[in-house]
Image (cartoon, helix red, strand yellow):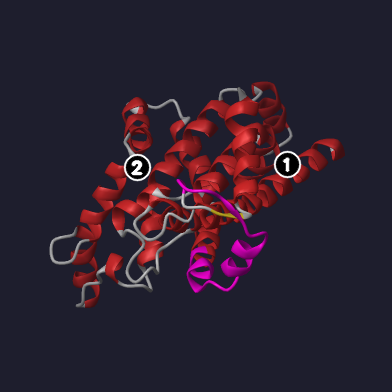
Amino acid sequence: MFLLYVIYPIVESMWLSFYDWDGLGAKAWIGLENYRELFDDDAFYTSLKNNILWLVLYMLAVPAGLFIALFLNQTVRGIRIYKSLFFFPFVISQVVVGLIFSWFYAPNFGLFYHLIEWLTGTGVAVLADDRYVTYGIIAAGLWPQIAYCMILYLTGLNNVSPDQIEAARLDGAKGWRMLWFVIVPQLRPATFIAVVVTVIGALRSFDLVSIMTDGGPYGSSRVLSFYMYEQALSEYGYRMGYGAAIAVVLFAIMMVFISGFIWKMVRDEQGG
């Protein structure tokens, strides 16, 4: 199943990137021409820059999810209600998240617009301003992503050894020292999954961009996955080979980050 639905499509996409193909007619071999065109394409560099921004800011979901999980791991009255509230963003569709934040940012009636207007005297149309649009979409994406990381860490906290915590308390560890030296090392499996999922989520970000801005204004909020869709499947082209070349670049970036984190984790385990 893995070979059929994962490995084969990856290899086929790489092979397709060397062709000029509209998806219906005969394929024409053009070698590296798609890649040459790609690296002279301003829209590609805009998408790449936005993806790097997504990746950097999306990683905030990991520590945020950890601290919320630590808060929700307390045994206090009503904690199940708080857990439900924090869990809620994860169970709703990304499309719904995009619509909610589109209304939140909307000029004239959006809550965020009125808040900025009240603070500064002038409202900001976030999704219509190329300086802020990518940050606005990333903020929308962080809302459910933090909830997902929180769930992973809540699961991990259930497996933390109470014996190690008790021993650390006897040695005088508490607060940040307890967290950093005792709890966080035991959460490495949860951290690994959280980082990998967050990296993949940042690099394949498509649905929020499509729902909130459709790549605008003037293509300034495009990311690689959305640009790939535009080139391969939208009314702009049906350029399957060019879209596959974008997909290959995106896959390579993803593998660099994930492989680097796996290597660091294995090295830390061997060092321990």
- Residue furthest left as drawn: 109
Q: Amino acid at mark 1?
A: Ile
Cβ atoms at labels 2 and 1 below 8 Å apart: no
Q: x, y (%) of residue 55?
A: 54, 56
Mark 2, Cα crowd under 10 Å, few <14 / some 14-19 / many 20+, is some
Magenta stretch: give its range. 23-47
Q: x, y (%) of residue 15?
A: 65, 47
| Residue 34 among those drawn in magenta | yes
Residue occupying image coordinates x 13% and y 61%: 109
Give the position of the C terminus as an image quadrant: top right
Q: Which mark is residue 262?
A: 1
- Residue furthest bottom as drawn: 121
Residue 174 appears in view: no
Rounded to the nearest angstrom, the CA distance separating label 2 from label 1 is 28 Å
Residue occupying image coordinates x 76% and y 45%: 264
Left or right: 223 as drawn, with respect to 216: right
Residue occupying image coordinates x 63% and y 65%: 33
- Label located before the other in sequence (2 or 1): 2
Quarter-of-image position of residue 37: bottom right
Q: Which residue is mark 2?
A: 94
Q: Amino acid at mark 2?
A: Gln
| Residue 110 among those drawn in magenta | no
Mark 1, Cα crowd under 10 Å, few <14 / some 14-19 / many 20+, is some
Residue 50 appears in view: yes
